[in-house]
Amino acid sequence: MEVPEIGPAWLVTRYDDVRKVLSDNRFGVEPPGRAGSNDSLFQDPPGHTRLRSLVSKAFTPRYLAGMRARVGEIAASLLADMSRRAGPVDLVEALAIPLPLAVIGELLGIAEVERDAFRDRVDAVVTMDLMSPEAVRRGRSCRTTCLVWSLRSRRTPARTCSAL
């Protein structure tokens, strides 16, 4: 199949075929013609390994242990919000989506007032239809916006986990 702005791609849907493809080093995630790009989502080793190594240095066991209390605070706040609602609550919408978004937002230094915009951009990427040039454009816009937020937070940090 041909994916707009990416090029040729395989579409594998049967469970046994997916298992074979995922365990076969002849298949990769890096689209043809994009070798050496800095897009960590679409890189094969050794490029992905190099980027992962850089990121993992920021997430030491000590750092992650220090985040535990803040993640607990965020979870407790979301659960308290859920308990104040009347009637049934959608667990995914009330907890499973906002919790990781809040934690990632804090890791990137995204101010709380910008979290809704952050979620909109994350939703654009997560629900991206790779067959739609508009969706691919929105996904790229999301990555650019997140990079800008992250760079800005280095100059004027929001309340991040590392600051707690």
Image: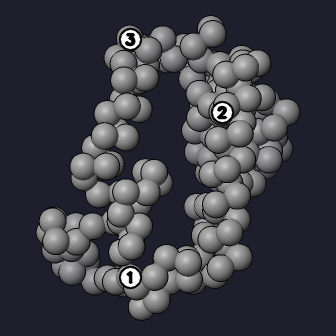
Q: Nearer the viewer, residue 155 or 101?
A: 155
Amino acid under disc 3 = Arg
Q: Quadrant of residue 118?
A: top right
Q: Whole-Å distance between the Cαs marked 3 and 2?
A: 22 Å
Q: Measuring 80% from the left and 44% from the top, which residue is drawn there?
A: 116
Q: Nearer the viewer, residue 124 or 31?
A: 31
Q: Residues within 10 Å of mark 3 (few under 14, many from 20)?
A: few
Q: Quadrant of residue 36?
A: bottom left
Q: Measuring 42% from the left and 91% from the top, which residue is drawn there?
A: 1
The residue that label 2 is drawn on is: 150
Q: In the image, residue 115 lies at what x, y percent?
A: 76, 39
The residue that label 3 is drawn on is: 62
The nearer-to-camera label among 3 and 1 is 1
The residue that label 1 is drawn on is: 9
The nearer-to-camera label among 3 and 2 is 2
* Horizontal relation, residue 97 to residue 152: left or right: left
Q: Are marks 2 and 1 in contact (CB under 8 Å)?
A: no
Amino acid under disc 2 = Ser
Identify the image quadrant of the C terminus: top right
